[in-house]
Image (spheres, rainbow, N blue to C red):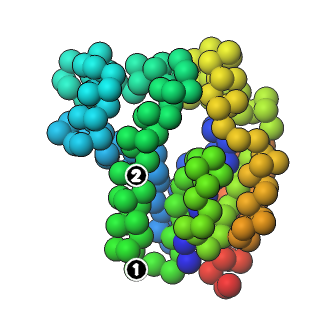
Amino acid sequence: MKIALTGGIACGKSNVAQLFEQLGAEVISLDELSRQVVVPGSAGLSELVDCFGDDILTVDKTLNRKILQEILLKNKANQQLIEDILHPKILEKMQMEIENCKKQLIIIEIPLLVEKNLAYLFDRAIIVECNEENQLKRLIKREKIDKNSAKTLISAQTSHSNRLKLADQLSIDVIENNLEIFDLEQKVRNLYQKLINL
């Protein structure tokens, strides 16, 4: 069963994915695949350099993600261009990973599931959400950015209510991640048991 794991930025998708993996599910992270498609020598990195110049590279010719993020945040056209270059490559890698997987439960961590209209690729979805205060705190700490930059990143994604509209296309489960890790662990364990028994 292919299950999309989505939710707001810094809401805890990676923690949930890690817990599912510990329970025995196969986990595919699109964030990880996005790093793989821009390694030195890759077509993805080459196309980004063609569009934005060598300034996006570090001294050792790897992608400077901080600079690329700044370019992405400058305007929608840059964001669209970056997505047009990388998303097809990421989805192709994802499909290859899924085809090679032998486990019953495949969790695909995909932040932009709703924004990119990709629900049709999956059997179910899990939405991880948290309140805005926690989301801002986590994002500022994780990315080492200021509050305004964090708000910009959050606003670039769809709302929780839009994610819930996934229920029109496939079955969804929602995990609220506002409490301590043991609470999250219990929620994931319960959901895992439910999913493997479907």
Q: Is residue 66 above or below residue 188?
A: above
Distance from the alpha carbon under mark 2 to that under mark 1: 24 Å
Number of numbered tags placed on the structure image: 2
x and y percentages locating residue 40 in the rendered image = 20, 36
**Residue 2 drawn at (x, y percent):** 55, 72
Q: Nearer the viewer, residue 160 or 50?
A: 50
Residue beneath the point at 40% across and 52% down: 88
Residue type beneath disc 1 = Lys
Q: Position of residue 196 (x, y in %)?
A: 62, 81
Question: Where is residue 46 shown, x and y percent of the image?
Answer: 23, 34
Q: Quadrant of residue 133?
A: top right
**Given the image, on which type of amino acid does mark 2 rest?**
Pro
Indicate the secondary structure of the residue bearing disc 2: helix
Q: Residue furthest bottom?
A: 197
Quarter of the picture holding the N terminus: bottom right
> Which residue position is annotated with label 1?
102
